[in-house]
Amino acid sequence: QVQLVESGGGLVQAGDSLRLSCAASGRTFSNYAMGWFRQAPGKEREFVAGIRWSGTGTYYAEPVKGRFTISRDNAKNTVYLQMNSLAPEDTAVYYCAARLSYGFPGAKSEDYDYWGQGTQVTVSS
């Protein structure tokens, strides 16, 4: 079992930056690929970014490429999502997720085994 707790969300203005954190506990964190997803009101949950267990491979959804950066610190059992140039369309609840995998982290919700409770990000125009 892996427990995931997100933090760092909040209310910001368009163009601002935020860094989300996801602290993991339970099983060996470095055995897991990690992902960030988001869900806006009335929309389905969508993939944002993923990172391999070693941190050497990262993957991004098209809408966030060049603006968001996913990283991880296995010594701290934490994965991060640095979000720059935020726009109102980035408003959503952001979730981190863990997948027991040494390969590609996956871009579908069903690829992941554990989920955090989510953190709200609201971007005003």
Image (cartoon, rainbow, N blue to C red):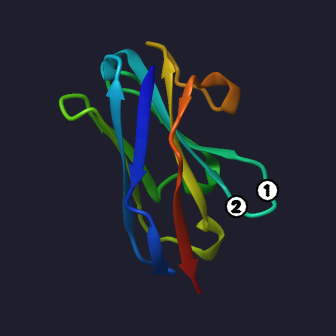
Confirm whether residue 108 shows in the render.
Answer: no
Farthest-out residue, left? 75
- Residue 80: % across, % down: 35, 46
Q: CA distance from mark 1 to mark 2?
A: 5 Å
Residue drawn 18% across and 29% down? 75
Residue drawn 67% across and 32% down? 109
Secondary structure state at the residue bearing disc 2: loop
**For the residue marked with disc 1, what is the amino acid?**
Lys
Task: Please report contact status of discs 1 and 2: CB closer than 8 Å, yes or no.
Answer: yes
**For the residue marked with disc 2, what is the amino acid?**
Ala
Determine which quarter of the picture holds residue 72. Answer: top left
- Above or below residue 7? Residue 11 is below
Q: Nearer the viewer, residue 100 or 72?
A: 100
Which numbered disc covers residue 59?
Answer: none
Residue picked out by circle 1: 43
Q: Nearer the viewer, residue 3 or 19?
A: 3
- Above or below residue 34? Residue 85 is below
Would residue 32 appear left or right of 122 to someone viewing this image? left
- Residue 47: % across, % down: 63, 42
Determine which quarter of the picture holds residue 91. Answer: bottom right
Residue picked out by circle 2: 40
Q: Quadrant of the C terminus?
A: bottom right
Secondary structure state at the residue bearing disc 1: loop
- Residue 74: % across, % down: 24, 28
Residue drawn 79% across and 56% down? 43
- Above or below residue 46? Residue 53 is above
Residue drawn 63% across and 56% down? 63
Would residue 105 appear left or right of 8 to someone viewing this image? right
- Above or below residue 66? Residue 59 is above
